[in-house]
Image (cartoon, rainbow, N blue to C red):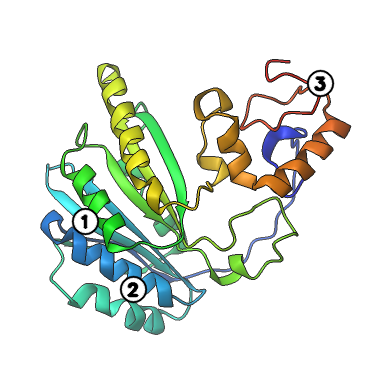
């Protein structure tokens, strides 16, 4: 299985080993939205040269007080002094509106997004992998986030890949996108159910506009159910060759498609609704 998701059974227990991590250098930097192009270009530059210990994300959003911003989130899991040195250029090219980037516990970094996604928020996500973030892709992101459907709607560029991810044998696991560089997400968010259709339309249109820059692959955990995304999107998450290998496993262990309430890998002889 090794990445095939919930298509082959149910995990009832597992064991894991903890490793000491921290303190880390992590947190957010927010800049005025008018600087979004430069912020995303800086993010692009840093993500191309980041060592394995550094993860950098970028976001275009509206703060709770109504201020539209371009943000960078970072986490450096190594020596604090080295992390501060590597991240200093992000703090000094312009003065940020908000600077929360500094030494923290690893657990504090893991909770820093919690307040942005409170219980009860309506979500609609669309995602794709990007090989690179050219200026045209940046301009497309800015254009769509200039007029979001609601103030909660946002764009996210997540976890530059490469590093240890790219050094795993391509044939070793079901995960297919080891040569991708970024995951792009258009997030349609709202608190009022009456705004769901508008947020969903905005997220879909934004995602469609970003497809010229996409690898056509997608992280399987960012897919909705097959009925919403379509079977081709599930295949794209694994790639044609790996998808067929997973179908063979499905044929052997779940030929009636019992495990189907997921990003479904259909067995050969079973309809999607079996």
Numbered disc total: 3
Element class at badge 2: helix
Position of residue 8 relative to residue 53, above or below, is above
Residue visible at 75% across and 35% down?
Answer: 12
Which mark is in front, 2 or 1?
2
Task: Locate the N terminus by quadrant.
Answer: top right
First reached walking from the N terminus: tag 2 or tag 1: 2
Q: Residues within 10 Å of mark 3 (few under 14, many from 20)?
A: some
In the picture of the structure, the residue carrying the numbered disc 1 is 70
Residue visible at 64% across and 46% down?
Answer: 238
220 with respect to 156 (left or right): right
First reached walking from the N terminus: tag 3 or tag 2: 2
- Point out residue 193 in the picture as x, y percentages from the top left corner: 30, 18
Task: Locate the C terminus by quadrant.
Answer: top right
Which mark is in front, 1 or 3?
3
- Point out residue 213 in the picture as x, y percentages from the top left corner: 39, 53
- Point out residue 86 in the picture as x, y percentages from the top left corner: 35, 80
- Point out residue 228 in the picture as x, y percentages from the top left corner: 50, 25
Q: Residues within 10 Å of mark 1 (few under 14, many from 20)?
A: many
In the picture of the structure, the residue carrying the numbered disc 3 is 256
First reached walking from the N terminus: tag 1 or tag 3: 1
Do labels 3 and 2 touch, CB within 8 Å? Answer: no
In the picture of the structure, the residue carrying the numbered disc 2 is 45
Whether residue 193 appears in this view of the structure is yes
Position of residue 262 relative to residue 76, above or below, is above
CA separation in Å, label 3 and label 2: 48 Å
Residue visible at 55% across and 37% down?
Answer: 233
Element class at badge 3: loop
């Amino acid at each position: 299985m090794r990445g095939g998701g919930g298509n082959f059974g149910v995990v009832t227990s597992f064991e894991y080993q903890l490793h000491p991590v921290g303190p880390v250098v992590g947190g957010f930097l927010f800049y005025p939205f008018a600087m979004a192009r430069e912020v995303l270009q800086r993010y692009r530059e840093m993500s191309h040269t980041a060592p394995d210990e550094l993860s950098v994300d970028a976001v275009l959003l509206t703060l709770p007080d109504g201020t539209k911003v371009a943000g960078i989130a970072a986490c450096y899991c190594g020596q604090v002094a080295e992390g501060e040195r590597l991240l200093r250029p992000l703090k000094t090219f312009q003065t940020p509106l908000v600077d929360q980037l500094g030494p923290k516990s690893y657990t504090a970094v893991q909770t820093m997004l919690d307040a942005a996604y409170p219980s009860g928020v309506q979500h609609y996500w669309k995602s794709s992998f990007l090989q690179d973030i050219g200026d045209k892709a940046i301009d497309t992101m800015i254009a769509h986030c200039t007029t979001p459907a609601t103030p909660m709607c946002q764009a996210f560029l997540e976890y530059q890949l490469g590093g240890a991810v790219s050094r795993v044998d391509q044939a070793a696991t079901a995960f297919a996108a080891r040569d991708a560089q970024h995951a792009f997400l258009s997030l349609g968010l709202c608190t009022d159910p009456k705004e769901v259709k508008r947020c969903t339309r905005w997220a879909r249109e934004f995602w469609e506009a970003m497809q010229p820059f996409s690898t056509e692959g997608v992280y399987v955990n960012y897919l909705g159910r097959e009925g919403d995304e379509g079977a081709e999107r599930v295949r794209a998450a694994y790639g044609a060759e790996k998808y067929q290998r997973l179908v063979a496993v499905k044929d052997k262990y779940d030929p009636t498609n019992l495990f189907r309430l997921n990003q479904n890998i259909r067995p050969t002889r079973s309809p999607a609704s079996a």
